[in-house]
Image (tube, grey):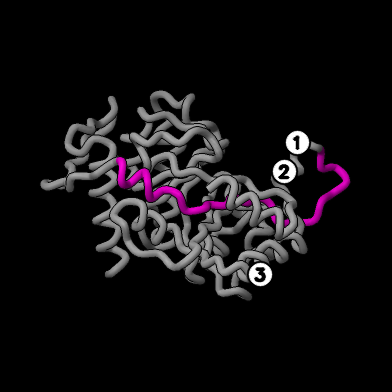
Amino acid sequence: MRRRRLWSLLVALALAGCGGSHATAPAGQPSAAPPKRAPRTDVAAVAARARVPVLCYHQIRPLRAGDGAAARPYIVSPGAFARQMQALADAGYHPVSGEQLVAHVARGAALPRRPVLLTFDDASAGQFTTALPILRRHRFVATFFVMTVVLDKPGWLTRREVRALDRAGMTIGAHTWDHHPVPGYAGDDWRVQIDQPTHELGRLVGHPIRLFAYPFGLWKPTGIVHLWHAGLVAAFQLAGPFDRHHPLWNLRRIIVPEWSGRRLLREIRRDF
């Protein structure tokens, strides 16, 4: 019940931040009635709170002989990941949930000292088999952005594992159907890539999905209303420029490769 009330408030705040009652439904989609009293949002204040470090991981597994130079930045070995999590713990960082971060950015909800958000994109198998035990060892929470086309396929998360992540206290977010970049969407792409995967994940875990990560970190302001119509309240890019006019819809993250723990801490201080 508490989560439901929180998400209801965040939906209203996110709508207000992208234009409130002025937001209109895209062609071919039914209009969704905005809250009767959309709260006034101080966009500058919201943007100023979007400074919490957000880390983005992809594959947690050993390097293989066939991994080329282009793939290596997205692969972190189990040992390196464990050392990075230990470095965060030793430095006094407190991982927060995706819900906590959005509540802080949207309305100033309190966060622990030295907050950090850990996120995982795409739904590769090692996120459950390797990363989750390390996270639980430290009592860390994380947010997993799931690309639904890969579910139950070899090397990727199963639907059962997605449910298990949710029940373990992790946040499940949407990451499109098959990772096509949002700026190229037109017509039925919004239904196939945003609406259907988001609703499928909601049915899978038994509650609505509210967070989204843009494939390749690429986004466009005109897509915000489509995300909102799918029930989403915030979205994450990567390390591109931050648009202060839409602070909840382009939250910045940095991709974490095979760094030492010390290097990770240095990059967090530099980027956030």
- Amino acid at dot 2: Pro
Q: Which mark is residue 143?
A: none
Provide the secondary structure element on which disc 1 rests. Answer: loop
Q: Where does label 1 land, which residue?
A: 70
Q: Residues within 10 Å of mark 3 (few under 14, many from 20)?
A: some
Q: Which mark is residue 73?
A: 2
Q: Is residue 62 magenta?
A: yes
Q: Where does label 3 land, which residue?
A: 134
x, y (%) of residue 16?
23, 42
User: Alpha-carbon distance for marks 1 and 3?
Assistant: 26 Å
Compared to residue 91, the image places residue 75 above or below, namely above
Location of the N terminus by quadrant is bottom left
> Does label 2 or label 3 sit earlier along the sequence?
2
Provide the secondary structure element on which disc 2 rests. Answer: helix
Q: Residues within 10 Å of mark 1 (few under 14, many from 20)?
A: few
User: Alpha-carbon distance for marks 2 and 3?
Assistant: 20 Å
Compared to residue 66, the image places residue 130 above or below, namely below
x, y (%) of residue 81?
70, 61
Q: Does the residue at mark 1 contact the one at mark 2 (Cβ under 8 Å)? A: yes
- Magenta region: 44-68
> Does label 1 or label 3 sit earlier along the sequence?
1
Provide the secondary structure element on which disc 3 rests. Answer: helix
Residue at (49, 33) in percent of width and height: 241
x, y (%) of residue 38?
16, 46
Q: Do we see residue 122 in this rendering?
A: no
- Amino acid at dot 1: Ala
